[in-house]
C-alpha cells in the first residue's frame, strides 16, 4: 500500500540555513560567516546580556510555578513593550487605544497580525519593500494574502529610492496593507530619514492605507527612542496601524522567542473589541505564550538598575556594529580599493547591501571561506577585530 506522503515534494531549502550548513562543513580555520542575522560579540559569540543573566538568576531562585499565562501575555510584559515603542508619556497609551499582545518573536507577531488582518479585511493586498526580509512575503502569503512589492532600494545610491517609494504608495488601493521596516532595514541597511517618515505617514493617511511597522532592531541604529521615530510619527497622525516588535536582537534572546504585536485603534472601546478578536487568533494557534523569555524582559525593563544595565549593553552592541562599519570601510580602502564604500557607514543596523555580485560572493566563499548571501548582503555584527582585516582583504581581491 502506498504512503499518504508518497507524492510529497521536497520544499526549497531556506537559503540562510543552507549557507550555515555549508559554513559548518568548511574546515578552513579562517572561515567567516557573514550570512546569519545574529549579533556576535568581538569573540564571535552570541552574548548573554548581564541584565538578562541577573533577571534569570533571580527568577530561578524564586522558582515560580508554571501556570498558564493570559492569552495575550502578562500585563507587566505588554506594558513594558508599549513604553518602549510608544514612549511612556504616549497619549495613545494614556487613552487606552493600544492593544498589545505577547508573541513568539517578531515572526509570531507578524503572523498573528497577518491572520487577524485576513479576518478584518480579507480582500486587502499586502505590500512589502523591494527587497525585504525574505520571510515577509511567505508569511503574509501563508495568511492568505496576495503580496506585492513597493519600490524601496536604489542600487545606484545604495540608499532609499524615495521617489519610487512614494509613487508606489500613491498607486495602492485604499485598505492596502503596507509592511514598513521601522528601522535598520533588512536586508539593505537603508533607512528613511525623519522627514521622509513624515511624508510616508501623510501618504498612508491620504491613501487610506493600513501601515504595519515591523520593528526587529530597536536600539541598533541610534538608540531606543530615536529608533522608534516611525512608530512615534504614525502615533501622532491619528491613523490606526499595526506594529510587530522583537526582543530577539536587542535582548539577545533569539531562541526564547520573545516579541509582541501592538495595534493602535481609534479609542478604548475599539481596543477592547480588537483585543477580544486577536485573542481568538492566538487561542486557536498556541493558546497562550511561554513564560520565561517575557518574564526576563519584563523584569529587566521594570527594574531601574537592570534597565540601565541593559541600555548600556545595548549601546555596546550598537557601537560595536558601527565600529565594524567604519573599520570595514577603512580596511577596504587600506587594501588599495579606490571604489567608494562609504555607504556602508551610512547604512544602519546589522546589515549592509554591499553591491557585491553573486559571482563575487561565490568567490569569497570558494577562495576565502567567507560566507554571505548571494544578494551581497553581509551581517556587520559577524565582523570582529580578529577577522575584519581578513574580510576586507578578501573583498579587495574579489572586486
Ligand atoms: N522582521 C525582520 C525585518 C527581521 O529581520 C527579523 C529577524 O531577522 C524578524 C522580523 C523576526 O524576528 P524574530 O527572530 O524575533 O522572529
Image (spheres, helix red, strand yellow):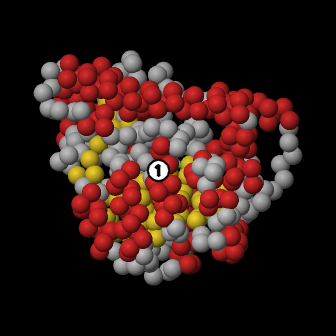
The residue at the point 72 percent across, 40 percent down is 302
Q: Is 139 located above or below residue 17 in the figure? A: below
The spot of residue 309 in percent (x, y) is 64, 28
Image position of 143 with respect to 252: above or below: below
User: Can the viewer see residue 398 in this picture?
Assistant: yes
Position of residue 299 measured from the top left corner of the image (x, y, whole percent): 73, 39
* Vertical placement of residue 29 versus 290, above or below: above
Disc 1, SS: helix
Q: Which residue is mark 1?
A: 229
Q: Could one spot residue 26 in this view of the protein?
A: no
Q: Residue furthest bottom?
A: 123
Q: Is residue 165 left or right of residue 207?
A: left
Query: Which x, y percent locates residue 222?
Result: 45, 37
Quarter of the N terminus within the rendering: bottom right
Q: Residue at x 64, y 44 (%)?
A: 256
Q: Residues within 10 Å of mark 1 (few under 14, many from 20)?
A: many
Q: Residue at x 65, y 59 (%)?
A: 93
Q: Which quarter of the figure has residue 108?
A: bottom right
Left or right of 387? Residue 124 is: right
Which x, y percent locates residue 151?
A: 28, 61
Amino acid at each position: 500500500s502506498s504512503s499518504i506522503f508518497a507524492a510529497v515534494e521536497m520544499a526549497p531549502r531556506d537559503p540562510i540555513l543552507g549557507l550555515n550548513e555549508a559554513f559548518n562543513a568548511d574546515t578552513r580555520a579562517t572561515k567567516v560567516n557573514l550570512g546569519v542575522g545574529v549579533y556576535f560579540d568581538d569573540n564571535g559569540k552570541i552574548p548573554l546580556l548581564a541584565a538578562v543573566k541577573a533577571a534569570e538568576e533571580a527568577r530561578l531562585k524564586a522558582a515560580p510555578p508554571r501556570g498558564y499565562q493570559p492569552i495575550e501575555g502578562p500585563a507587566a510584559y505588554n506594558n513594558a513593550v508599549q513604553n518602549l515603542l510608544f514612549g511612556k508619556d504616549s497619549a495613545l497609551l494614556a487613552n487606552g487605544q493600544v492593544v498589545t499582545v505577547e508573541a513568539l518573536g517578531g515572526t509570531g507577531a507578524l503572523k498573528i497580525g497577518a491572520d487577524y488582518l485576513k479576518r478584518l479585511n480579507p480582500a486587502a493586498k499586502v505590500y512589502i519593500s523591494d527587497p525585504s526580509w525574505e520571510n515577509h512575503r511567505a508569511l503574509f502569503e501563508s495568511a492568505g494574502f496576495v503580496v506585492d512589492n513597493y519600490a524601496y532600494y536604489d542600487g545606484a545610491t545604495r540608499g532609499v529610492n524615495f521617489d519610487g517609494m512614494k509613487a508606489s504608495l500613491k498607486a495602492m488601493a485604499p485598505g492596502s496593507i503596507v509592511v514598513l521596516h521601522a528601522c535598520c532595514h533588512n536586508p539593505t541597511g537603508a533607512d528613511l530619514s525623519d522627514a521622509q517618515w513624515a511624508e510616508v505617514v501623510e501618504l498612508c493617511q491620504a491613501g487610506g492605507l493600513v501601515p504595519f511597522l515591523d520593528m526587529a532592531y530597536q536600539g541598533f541604529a541610534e538608540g531606543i527612542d530615536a529608533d522608534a521615530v516611525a512608530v512615534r510619527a504614525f502615533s501622532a497622525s491619528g491613523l490606526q496601524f499595526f506594529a510587530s516588535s522583537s526582543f530577539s536582537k536587542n535582548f539577545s534572546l533569539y531562541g526564547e522567542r520573545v516579541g509582541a504585536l501592538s495595534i493602535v485603534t481609534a479609542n478604548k472601546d475599539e481596543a477592547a473589541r480588537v483585543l477580544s478578536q486577536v485573542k481568538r487568533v492566538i487561542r486557536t494557534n498556541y493558546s497562550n505564550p511561554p513564560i520565561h523569555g517575557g518574564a526576563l524582559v519584563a523584569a529587566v525593563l521594570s527594574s531601574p538598575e537592570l534597565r540601565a544595565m541593559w541600555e548600556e549593553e545595548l549601546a555596546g552592541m550598537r557601537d560595536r556594529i558601527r565600529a565594524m562599519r567604519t573599520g570595514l570601510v577603512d580596511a577596504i580602502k587600506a587594501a588599495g580599493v579606490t571604489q567608494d564604500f562609504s555607504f556602508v557607514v551610512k547604512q544602519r543596523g546589522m546589515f549592509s547591501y554591499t553591491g557585491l555580485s553573486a559571482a563575487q560572493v561565490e568567490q569569497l566563499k570558494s577562495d576565502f571561506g567567507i560566507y554571505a548571501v548571494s544578494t551581497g548582503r553581509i551581517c556587520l555584527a559577524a565582523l570582529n577585530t580578529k577577522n575584519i582585516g581578513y574580510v576586507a582583504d578578501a573583498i579587495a581581491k574579489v572586486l
